[in-house]
Amino acid sequence: MLRKYKESIRDCQRAIECDKTNIKPYFRSAKCSLQLGDTFEAGRQLKMAKEVAQGTPSLKKQIPIIEKELEMVEKVENLMNKMEEHIKNEKFEEALSALEDAMLLADPLLKRNTESKTISKVDTNSLGGVSLKWRLQRGELLIRNQLYEEANKVTTEILKADSTNSEAITLRAKVLYLMNSIKIESVQQSIRQALSYDPDNTKARKLLNKIKKLEKEKDESNNLFKAGSYAKAIEGYDKVLEEQRKEGLTGVLEVKVLSNKATCNSKLEKHKEVIKDSTKAIELLEKITFQSYNPGPSDYQTCINSALFTKLFMRRANSYMKTEGYEEAVRDYKVLQQMKGNDREILQALRSAEQAFKQASKKDYYKILGLDKNSNPTESEIKKAYRKNALKYHPDKCAGLSEDEKAEAEKKFKDIGEAYAVLSDPNKKRIYDMGGDVDGSSASGGSPFGGMGMGGTEEDILRMFMGGMGGMGGMGGMGGGMPFFTFSTGGPRGGSRQRGSYQDFSSFF
């Protein structure tokens, strides 16, 4: 079959002029028009065939057949109109669905897609009898849905039949550009080749200009990054991303720009932004690489974009650690560990993340006392922080609060005692810092004055503080010095105290 549909339509018109009562040329002309993607002309030819049949008694039996064909063409036309509407509204998945429904309706021999897990309904290899115009439109919509490999198949099939098809060469160059499969110079050379076959190919000329502009803007942002102007580089990358999405030129290139932007934010310690951009990039790269398939670590490892996945997961995991998202960091490091095997750096990072996650699932004794663990607080700083917080939440100071507030203060007071009991004891502190299990609620707190073990409750620890640096009655022969104060945890604020009162000991802080 030569598929010279325009020549066939001209032949049909000449046949109709010779014999207007012959409806076969109308049928053939309609089918050829449909092959060219012209549903209006196909419908017009069938309507003329119906008029001829209605006026010719011997052809009346053909009317139901003509009406069936006409109904099919009208349905196809409606689907194409829906496609155009979806494109205007940037609903590209719906647009692809409408186009492929039209193809299946127009060509009963077209095979449905039964193997691929993509949203595409048709088998690209069976599209030979479908309008070239529609096949190219499908290629564009596949690109819009990030189905680049399928779009590449479309161009391959077209170019097998006609290696000089300018539109197919342009579409193929666009696919390869978005997949980042070849150097930018080769992409531009391919587009110029398309223009050499058809100098009036406006799509090719526009694509070439857009690519030049985007590459220039991206290079400018890269140079700002290299110069350490990270904030300005981010502004440049945002501009590139906006242009890419506006022109439908996203793909792996968008992933790389998002990755570059994440690197800049990492330099600026904006780790929440790093996580956001890295997550967007990973999700887009997964869609491009695996389409609708849910990948696992082995898939990341063996795919063509493995290096880029590694970079993105590593950067996101590091930022999760910086923002105390330890569980998420463990998840990403485990993916990396399965991808990279026994990589020492990743194994060490995974161990650190698991330790931090384990620690975070426990009470943060440093945070409870208002201390920064990374600053490695001294013994005196731990004592000072304990005194300050224990006094703030002591039951005597919370007597005027509501029952709920009292309960909350009591819990905090208990946590403060637990925190001190652990952090004041060098052995327990060492175990805690290493992620070991230490039960602060039953731990014996070390004496803040050294050389003296002490047990009991938060009240006991605080009471010991209030005993002063001199004598501590009943605590092992440290005679003389300041009086030993005790506290009651109930009763009205004006109630009696044992040897002193809240007002008495407040001056010690």
Image (spheres, rainbow, N blue to C red):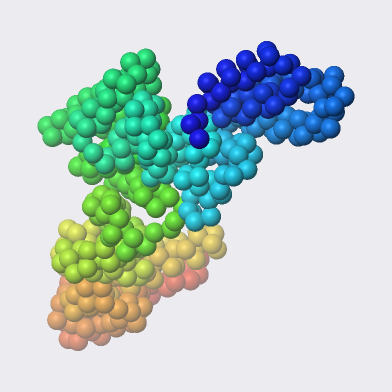
Looking at the picture, tell me which residue is in the foreground, 324 or 258.
258
Please tell me which residue is depicted at 34% across the width and 32% down the height of the picture: 163
> Does residue 183 appear to the left or right of 169 in the view shown?
left
> Does residue 1 appear to the left or right of 158 in the view shown?
right
Looking at the picture, tell me which residue is in the foreground, 356 or 410.
356
Q: How many marks?
A: 0
Image-quadrant location for residue 170: top left
Q: Position of residue 420 (x, y in %)?
A: 27, 71
Image-quadrant location for residue 229: top left
Looking at the picture, tell me which residue is in the foreground, 83 or 259.
83
Residue extending farthest to the top is 17
> Does residue 331 appear to the left or right of 109 in the view shown?
left
Please tell me which residue is depicted at 87% across the width and 24% down the height of the picture: 57
Where 270 falls versus 187 (above or below)?
A: below
Regarding residue 285, the answer to whether it shows in the image is yes
Q: Position of residue 85 (x, y in %)?
A: 59, 27
Residue extending farthest to the front is 18
Q: Position of residue 501 (x, y in %)?
A: 37, 67
Please tell me which residue is depicted at 41% across the width and 40% down the height of the picture: 157
Regarding residue 143, the answer to whether it shows in the image is no
Please tell me which residue is depicted at 36% across the width and 68% down the height of the picture: 361
Q: On the rendered image, what quadrant is the C terminus found in?
A: bottom left
Where 107 falls versus 355 (above or below)?
A: above
> Does residue 38 appear to the left or right of 454 in the view shown?
right
Looking at the picture, tell me which residue is in the foreground, 274 or 242.
242
Residue extending farthest to the right is 57
Q: Position of residue 340 (x, y in %)?
A: 22, 64
